[in-house]
Amino acid sequence: MNFDIENLSANQKLQRAYILINSSDDYSFIRQGLRALVRLSENLEYASSCDVWDLLENARIRPNNPRSMGLVFKLAHKNGLIQRTDNYRPSRRTQANQRPVRIWRFIK
């Protein structure tokens, strides 16, 4: 599969994401990421991808492609589990070099 997405429309990018999900390449990671978000929603009002990474890495669940975390949040948002906020904080993950990550609010 061609992973170049620079010249694709937003709809084409979303279709490509769903193709990746359905290809089973990272299906298990995405499923576990969604489960982690549900678990976090039981105790937290807000979360970031760092919170999900922490849970998954503690369980030794790793993606084939780290970009799959974006799909976890896109699916959670589209399914009404989380809502985007305008807040960001520096990532706690060393791989991310403290880049800003979005804070999401759980919908209860």
Image (cartoon, rainbow, N blue to C red):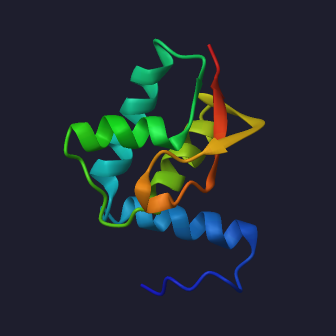
The percent coordinates of residue 67 (x first, y second) are 47, 63
| Residue occupying the point 52% across, 60% down | 97
Depth check, front residue: 100 or 78: 100
> Where is 62 relative to 79, above or below?
below
Quadrant where the image shows the N terminus: bottom left
> Where is 101 relative to 19, above or below?
above
The percent coordinates of residue 14 (x first, y second) are 62, 63
Depth check, front residue: 10 or 93: 93
The percent coordinates of residue 92 (x first, y second) are 48, 45
| Residue occupying the point 74% across, 68% down | 10
Q: Is residue 15 left or right of residue 93?
A: right
How many numbered badges does the structure rendering display? Answer: 0
| Residue occupying the point 67% across, 72% down | 12
Depth check, front residue: 53 or 17: 53
Q: Is residue 68 left or right of residue 44?
A: left
Q: Is residue 104 left or right of residue 62?
A: right
The percent coordinates of residue 98 (x first, y second) are 56, 54
Q: Is residue 79 left or right of residue 6?
A: left
Name the quadrant containing residue 36.
top left
Name the quadrant containing residue 25.
bottom left
Q: Residue furthest left?
A: 60
Quadrant where the image shows the C terminus: top right
